[in-house]
């Protein structure tokens, strides 16, 4: 703790200093970010991954806090739900292109929850350009394709090898569990809900408990 205050003071002073200067190199457009000054400060300090982590937290809050995002839940006609999720993901990836969790999380939300598979596929294909051998990206592309065709079984089977990975977003596990319920494949659904009991997101933990009780009683 004795180093905390000097570090905080240094960052505070640097923040004020760098905010008064024009960037010395081309930087991403952070017009949609709520904290552009802080992000620019971290970039000037060479802390790109930390900046990406902070922006990822903002993305999680943006997509997870429905009460605070009423406009995005009730957009004008012709405007999609959560219109900023794709651009926010792209901003984070401009900071750290190797931040694969961002691609997986945003692509899952866009493809399986928001009905915008084209944007999801763009994120995945960009990822494959950087990592041609990334099998998880390939699995997501396949799952999205099968989902577009209405083949739910093939969609979850494409994701199958990765569904139980601790690095797989809870959102994807929840979507897959719901598909298994629709297919009346109770053991597979229960296994995923059991894993979601350990999710960092309280909402998924609560939902998992409820669904496990229903599966036990077969009240689906």
Image (tube, rainbow, N blue to C red):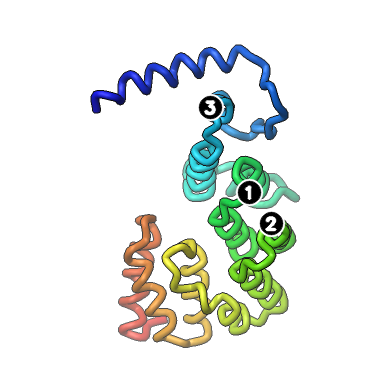
Please give the count of numbered marks on the rendered protein: 3
- Residue occupying the point 63% across, 34% down: 32
- Residue occupying the point 62% across, 43% down: 88
- Residue occupying the point 68% across, 51% down: 80
Mark 1 surroundings: few (<14), some (14-19) or many (≥20) residues within 10 A = some
The circle drawn on residue 97 is: 1
Whether label 1 touches label 2, CB < 8 Å: yes
Residue 47 placement, left or right of 139: left
Q: Earlier in the sequence, mark 1 or mark 2?
A: 1
Vertically, is 14 above or below 45? above
Vertically, is 62 above or below 192? above
Q: Earlier in the sequence, mark 3 or mark 1?
A: 3
Q: Position of residue 25 (x, y in %)?
A: 70, 26
Q: Position of residue 79 (x, y in %)?
A: 71, 48
- Relative depth, front residue between 112 and 160: 160
Q: CA distance from mark 3 to mark 1?
A: 18 Å
Name the residue beneath numbered marker 3.
45
- Residue occupying the point 48% across, 61% down: 169
Q: CA distance from mark 1 to mark 2?
A: 8 Å
Name the residue beneath numbered marker 2.
130
Q: Tell me the quarter of the image containing the N terminus.
A: top left
The circle drawn on residue 44 is: none
Q: Is disc 1 placed on a helix, strand or loop? A: loop
Mark 2 surroundings: few (<14), some (14-19) or many (≥20) residues within 10 A = few
């Amino acid at each position: 703790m004795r180093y905390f205050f000097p570090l905080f003071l240094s960052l505070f002073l640097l923040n004020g200093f760098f905010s008064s200067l024009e960037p010395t190199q081309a930087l991403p457009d952070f017009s949609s970010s709520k904290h552009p000054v802080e992000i620019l400060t971290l970039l000037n300090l060479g802390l790109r991954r930390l900046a990406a982590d902070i922006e990822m937290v903002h993305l999680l809050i943006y997509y997870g806090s429905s009460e605070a995002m009423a406009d995005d839940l009730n957009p004008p006609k012709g405007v999609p739900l959560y219109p900023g999720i794709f651009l926010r993901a792209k901003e984070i990836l401009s900071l750290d292109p190797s931040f694969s969790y961002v691609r997986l999380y945003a692509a899952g939300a866009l493809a399986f929850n928001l009905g915008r598979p084209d944007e999801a596929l763009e994120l995945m294909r960009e990822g494959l350009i950087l990592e041609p051998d990334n099998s998880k990206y390939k699995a997501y592309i396949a799952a999205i394709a099968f989902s577009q065709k209405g083949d739910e079984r093939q969609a979850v089977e494409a994701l199958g090898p990765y569904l139980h990975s601790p690095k797989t977003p809870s959102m994807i596990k929840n979507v897959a569990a719901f598909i298994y319920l629709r297919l009346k494949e109770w053991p597979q659904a229960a296994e995923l809900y059991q894993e979601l009991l350990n999710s960092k997101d309280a909402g998924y933990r609560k939902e998992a408990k409820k669904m496990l009780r229903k599966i036990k009683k077969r009240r689906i």
